[in-house]
Amino acid sequence: MEKKQNKDKQLSLSRRTFIKASGAAVTTAAVVGGVDVLFDSPDVVDAAVDLSNAKTFTSSCAMECLHHNLKGYVVDGKLVKVESNCDDTTKACLRGISRTQWVNHPDRIKMPMLRTGEKGEGKWKEIGWDEALDLIVTKIKETQQQYGNQGLAFRSGSGNFGSLTNSVGQTFFNYLGGNTPIFGSLCCQVVSTTMPAMIGTRTEAMRDTIPDSKYILVWGTNPAVTMQSYFPWYLDAMKKGARMVTIDPRLSETAAKSDEWVEILPGTDTALGLGMLKIIIEDKLYDKEFLLHKSSVPFLVDKTTGDQVKEEGNDTGYLVYDELSKSIVRHDTPGITPALSIVGTDITDKYTTVFDLIYEEAKPWTPEKVQEETDIPAGTVIRLAREYATTKPAMIIQNMGGFQRTEFGSYAVGIHIYLAIFTGNFGVPGAGVCDAGGVTQAIKVNPAIKPPEASTIAKYPAIPAPKFGEYILEDKPTKINFLWLMTTSLMTQFPNTNAVKQALKKIPFVVVADNLMTSTALYADLILPSTTIFEDTNLMASIRHQHVQLMEKAVDPVGQAKPDLWIFTELAKRFGFGEEFDKTPEELIERCLEGTGITIEQLKKGPVTPIPFPYIPYKDGIFKTPTKKAELFMPMWKEKGFNPVVTYIRPKEFIKGDQALVEKYPLMAVQRKINRTIHSSFGTLPWIIEAGGDTPHALIHPDDAAARGIKHDDKVVVYNDRGEHHAVAIVKAHIKPGIIALENGWWEQQGGSSSYVTNDAVEPLGGGHCCNNTLVEIKKEG
Amino acid sequence: MEAWELPLVLFTVLGQWGIGIALMITIAESVAPSIVDSANRQNIRFGGMMVLPLIALGLLFSVFHLGTPFAAYKALFNLGTSMLSLEILAFIIVSALALVYSYMWWKNPDSGLRRTIGIVLSVVGIIAIVISSKVYTMPTRLGWDSWETIAAFLLTAVLLGATTVAALVVGNKATDVMKANKVLAVIILLAVVGIVVTLAGISSMYGQSAEQSAVVIGTFANGMFFVRLLLSLMIPVIMAAYILSNKATNNLVTLGLGGIVVGELLGRVLFYSSTMSQYPWF
Amino acid sequence: MSKQVGFYIDMANCYGCQTCQVACKSEQGTTPAVSWRRVRHFDTDYPATHGTLSMSCNHCDNPECLKNCPTGAYVKLANGIVYQNHDKCIGCRMCVMACPYGAPQYDPEEGKVSKCSYCRERIEAGLQPQCVEACPGGNIIAGDLQELRAKYPGAVELTGMPKAKLTRPSIIINPAKAFKK
């Protein structure tokens, strides 16, 4: 199969461009017919740049996306242009290209800044690095003395996936003896707990064989925006005859390209999945051989204990009922025919099977009941089930979508996997449950810094990330005296922003390492200026990209900005454990690459791809669980007091949930990603503001708008008991009535995040973020 | 407010006003040759002298509507192709004629050359107005590409010119001047009819294309439009009635003129904004 | 050199990421007031559809910008590019008023108008226009217009777009689903 190429590629990207300057004047102010550029135009040469004397460097677009290899042009020590680099199969986007303006942004933080006014007031005093680092040491020691190490909290995020970034920070705190973790990724915590438990791993990319799929079920995610550079492969599949169906409350950009858009109520995806599974089971549309030999559904479950039954002393020795010998044997016994269901056998008083348990949960979900819960017409449910089960190969596109940022998102993740397993849609090209994936599926990358002995790192109870605000305000599980934040902006991304704001104000010493005055940096006690890509050397070898990349230092950092590595090295030295930190970036990169077969010398010549193409995860249905089978019964869920197989639990903050709340706030809000930002990154770059606007929008159905006297382009406020989000209304029938779509990523300085209203519940099965089960009201403003 | 294109509004209206005055003085004088010697001699001289400042002020506005006004001379470089280039040339000629005309009204009002220049200025002025309207009748600008554009520009000149000259000479009891006044009153009424027909023409554009429908809405659904109707239609009719019944005074018609000028300015604003507020059309 | 260059715009496969819009700005260094290439939205409610069309300048066969410019700033090059000699612009905005596609754009700071140059300098260096190079979906293709029209079926105008007969734009569009019968 040939590598996917962009249409009519007519140019090798390695050629330099020669542009004569056309000599336009340099602008200063920036007012564009109604769109104010909030920050000064950065000092980019205002004309086609003369690149005849440019030096080029490559780096990687490091925030949480697809980490495209970027080429930066440097003239006279200044980064003047960024382009997509290397004959990759995919290209960087408007955000990567706009990085020129990030590096050169006039509002870059140049010196450490100490708060002088109240938190959030924006009053700062510039101090030197020595003073800043000494202050941090003092604050850490004070915290350790007064509160112990649990008084220290650290949170890094998805702003930079470089190997010399986040892990260095956590390693520093580990050397200190540990810290209170702020636990749970906001995007996909429940995928991380569910998928590896069921199939052995996650982040194994299925993208390579999307064009081979014949039925693509995009379920509650939007690859046309969030995986945009390989979205053309979805369209390739369609050109080859694939049917693409998108399930989403909103006519997303992906839904607009699909053959069918299925509107669904947020948080009810599991009900739909169970309804589909019922039909697949009852109509015998399942792949029996696959189920019997590649999955755990024949495993026996003890009716008394509720646990799967294992051979004594054998952790993978699950037992099944062999129909041939009519006896209970180990699942991996050769030559047996395990029973899917043991109904009608003589062991049903003691046992049941995982299959039976699953069917028990699916059975009540008739198409009519599914329609009642999800609003999807019964006929559509039946048709989806049959189409999915019989059009092979079929792929469910999960991609960390918004459907699992709901109150029982783990079950929704689980039902996708159940459907794929039941239909044998795993381990063959064009099939599976598509997650984002990257080089770590093929190589093991070591941490940059040698970690301390595990026994020296205390394990403290965690603060669940969605409840950050509430826990800090209640000193749960302990009082936090010192917080370090890097590569993340809590004030735009964490739910219930007002609580987050109060929490940041309460914590006596908050350090934010960042390169711009983000919404979160506004609430710091001490801001440390960190470097951007192209200003430091780093390694990209992580979970979202196919190529290992060397990130080159192209220009000197602005002002006194320093790489996060340097910051932690200096601190480590002050604490007396600097030895492992105090190495050059190249040495540390070599440490990361040890054992992978990839060297820095290779990377200097270009990115290295350790993943074979095409990559087929769990090939031939061999999973990476201890049993090598897909394990659909989840002991982890049972331990938490929940049904160990997927079941539907109705969300509370939901139109059919807490009716007292619905009285006040009758609209369901979902969050969407827009192409101007990745989370909050890029949000204030002038080209991004020109292309993507400077004001949040709220999408509302014409019926709901009319009932509230709201017209297209009206200023509105979306609100509930948690807070308010100000936006401009888009009135279109592009969303299910009763639901509004808010945009993620807007800065305080741009009007404030949609997270001011979002649900801060913690998903009980996996610790996930529940922002897509939020109830609000909306009204016209002024 | 950017879509109002005020510099262009002022350029076109002031220029048309100045040309209209010259035209109407020429017509009035041909009906009543004694008009220059009559009791309104100073008024008529004043009118003639106003032609240059009005046209010059208009030109000044047109130059400063440019992004780079000091390069305005370059606007003459595409005469063979660009209607705007031709308009600039035409208005340079008009200005030259207006300079001579107004100067002669000041220094030598009784000269026969002054009358001849007046006729030439009137003719060249009308041509210049037609050219300036054709700047806008681009085939790609659907809301402007019609006879209504040309008519509107000409009617502004006629209405403002006739009302101005009437304001100057009304009340004069000389027989031929009274006849000239009646002629002016009839011209005013005809101009009003012309404006009504033009507006009817514009309204009939509705439905022919998205752009044209938007122009119709932008014109008629605008609050300014009703004010414009009062000022540019009602007031002239009242003025004409007064003139025809010999009850008009200079002050009255001057007052009316003030309202009509505002009306024409509003009308021109609507002409530009109903189209330019749609930018970009795609 | 070919007689008329043009753009093939695959609207059916374009998903509106706006990379072309920003890549153009990055290449040409245009000011905040000006985006030579813009993505237009085509949305309907009943049925709910969403389409995106990227367009810059169509280097028309009958360029109204060129005809209406009083300084003669626009010229049609031998290869068909409608090219603006920026020094000649006096900011009268006749081209802005004349173009049906909104291609020429006025910068109030500079007092001049500019528009897509088909990346003339890149073309002369043997490269592709930057928008073509940057589009992640390969949905913009530059080349000889006749060849493009022979290779790609499509339309020169769609409902809601200016009529092609007015300026004869050098484009061929693969219409979005909603426009296909």
Image: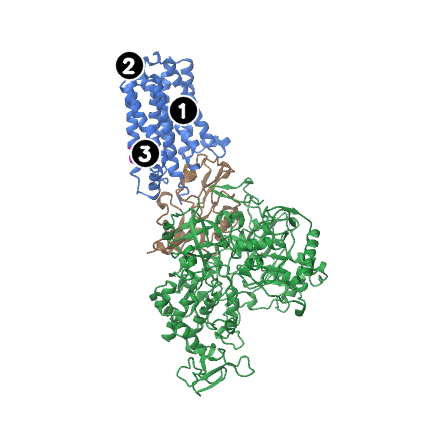
Q: Which mark is residue B148?
A: 3
Picture layout, residue A673 above or below residue B4: below
Residues in magenta, as a range:
B197-202
CA–CA distance between discs 1 and 3? 23 Å
Q: Is residue A471 visible?
A: yes
Left or right: B110, with C121 as reference point: left
The residue where tag 1 is placed is B94
Is disc 1 surrounded by few (<14), some (14 to 19) or many (20+) residues within 10 Å?
many
CA–CA distance between discs 2 and 3? 35 Å
Left or right: A555, with C50 as reference point: right
| Contact flag, marks 1 and 3 (Cβ < 8 Å) | no
* Pointer 1 and pointer 2 on the same chain: yes
Q: Chain of mark 1?
A: B
On the image, which quarter does residue A350 sit in?
bottom left
* Foreground tag (1 vs 3): 3
Type of amino acid under label 3: Glu
Q: Chain of mark 3?
A: B
Q: Main secondary structure of the magenta part?
A: helix
* Foreground tag (1 vs 2): 2
Q: Earlier in the sequence, mark 2 or mark 3?
A: 3
